[in-house]
Amino acid sequence: MSSHEIIDIPIRDDMIRLGQLLKLASLVDDGVEATELIKNGLVQVNGEIDERRGRQLHDGDTVTVNGETVRITTG
């Protein structure tokens, strides 16, 4: 996968939390790994570092970890 490719991740509800998304998108193996990446400033939401595991993400938001970017899509 190129670093410029954005993968759409569909969600059922209007919102998903950052930690949940990282697991859903298979960017991490578990919640512990998600927490560590977020706490260490290695996760970007919409191009900015976000250290809140409970950050609410909505349709169109992007998350980047280790050069991989995913975008939230609903419906």
Image (spheres, rainbow, N blue to C red):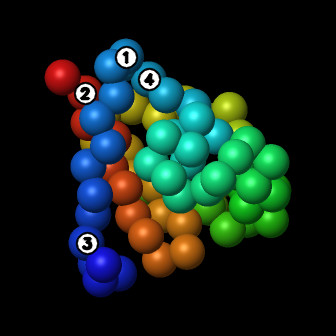
Label 4 SS: strand
Q: Toward which corner of the image does residue 38 lie, by quadrant?
A: bottom right
Residue on which the image places disc 3: 5
Q: x, y (%) of residue 64?
A: 48, 64
Rendered view: 48 above or below 12: below
- Judged left or right of residue 45, residue 32 is right
User: How far is the residue under mark 2 from the one under mark 1?
Assistant: 7 Å
Outermost top residue = 13
Q: Earlier in the sequence, mark 3 or mark 1?
A: 3
Label 2 SS: strand
- Judged left or right of residue 37, residue 6 is left
Which of these two is toward me, 55 or 26?
Answer: 26
Question: Residue, x 54% and y 66% (percent of image)?
Answer: 65
Q: Verify CB contact (< 8 Å) between mark 2 and mark 1.
A: yes
Outermost left residue = 75
Q: Which of marks 4 and 3 is nearer the N terminus?
A: 3
Specify the quadrant that holds the N terminus.
bottom left
Rendered view: 20 above or below 37: above
Question: Residue, x 44% and y 23% (percent of image)?
Answer: 15
Q: Residue 62 carries which label?
A: none
User: How far is the residue under mark 3 from the one under mark 1?
Assistant: 24 Å
Specify the quadrant that holds the C terminus.
top left
Residue kind at label 1, given as amino acid type: Asp
Q: Which mark is residue 74?
A: 2
Q: Which of marks 2 and 3 is nearer the N terminus?
A: 3
Residue on which the image places disc 1: 13
Q: Earlier in the sequence, mark 2 or mark 1?
A: 1
The answer to whether residue 4 is visible is yes
Q: Which of marks 4 and 2 is nearer the N terminus?
A: 4
Q: Verify CB contact (< 8 Å) between mark 1 and mark 4.
A: yes
